[in-house]
Image (spheres, rainbow, N blue to C red):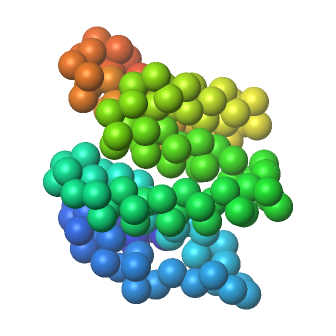
């Protein structure tokens, strides 16, 4: 997972290809598989926004669907990631209202469960969302808060 995250920060296309090749959905690799699905979804929605190609939204929706099914069994662990992916999905569609709703849900749930990493990630992505809306002050504030 650390490798995937570091590659993602440098070269999102290489990270996506790595994630696609190394997804495991059974046995001991399931946890890593779930995380890879999550990051694949984030990357797919990023590509959908930057390239405007429907195929990336469809790819991201596969991750949303996978996380939704895992949420039903392991709610506490995956619900935040599910909300983050939904927020990114709606953001890719240009649906500001639903995007904001799911970013806020992810942030609140992460805070309630004291999942600090997920809270930071939710705040950071919500900040970038605001920057895309040209709300620079709020975007910077959220990104700064994600680092605290």
Residue 86 image point, x, y percent? 52, 44
* Residue at x 66% of width, y 36% of height: 110
Question: Could you say which quadrant of the image residue 34 lies in?
Answer: bottom right
Q: Which of 33 and 52 is in front in this view?
A: 52
- What's the residue at 50%, 66% (across, down)? 62
Q: Residue at x 71, y 62 (%)?
A: 69
Q: Is residue 86 left or right of residue 17?
A: right
Residue 144 shows up from this direction: no
Q: In the current view of this chain or complex, which residue is farthest to the right?
A: 73
Left or right of residue 98: residue 44: left
As displayed, is residue 134 above or below residue 93?
above
Residue 129 figure quarter = top left
Point out residue 41 in the picture as x, y percentages from the top left corner. 44, 59
Which residue occupies 35% across, 40% down? 93
In the image, farthest residue toward the left: 51
Which of these two is toward me, 57 or 145?
Answer: 57
Q: Quadrant of residue 39?
A: bottom left
């Amino acid at each position: 997972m650390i490798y995937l995250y570091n590659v993602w920060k440098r070269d999102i296309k290489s990270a996506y290809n790595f994630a696609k090749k190394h997804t495991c959905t059974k046995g001991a690799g399931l946890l890593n598989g779930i995380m890879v699905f999550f990051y694949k979804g984030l990357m797919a929605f990023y590509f959908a926004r930057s390239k405007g190609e429907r195929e990336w939204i469809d790819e991201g929706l596969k991750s949303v669907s996978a996380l939704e099914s895992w949420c039903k069994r392991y709610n506490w662990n995956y619900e935040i990631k599910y909300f983050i992916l939904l927020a990114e999905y709606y953001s890719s569609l240009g649906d500001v209202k639903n995007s904001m709703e799911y970013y806020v849900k992810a942030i609140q749930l992460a805070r309630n469960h004291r999942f600090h990493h997920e809270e930071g990630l939710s705040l950071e992505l919500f900040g970038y969302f605001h920057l895309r809306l040209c709300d620079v002050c709020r975007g910077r504030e959220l990104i700064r808060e994600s680092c605290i």
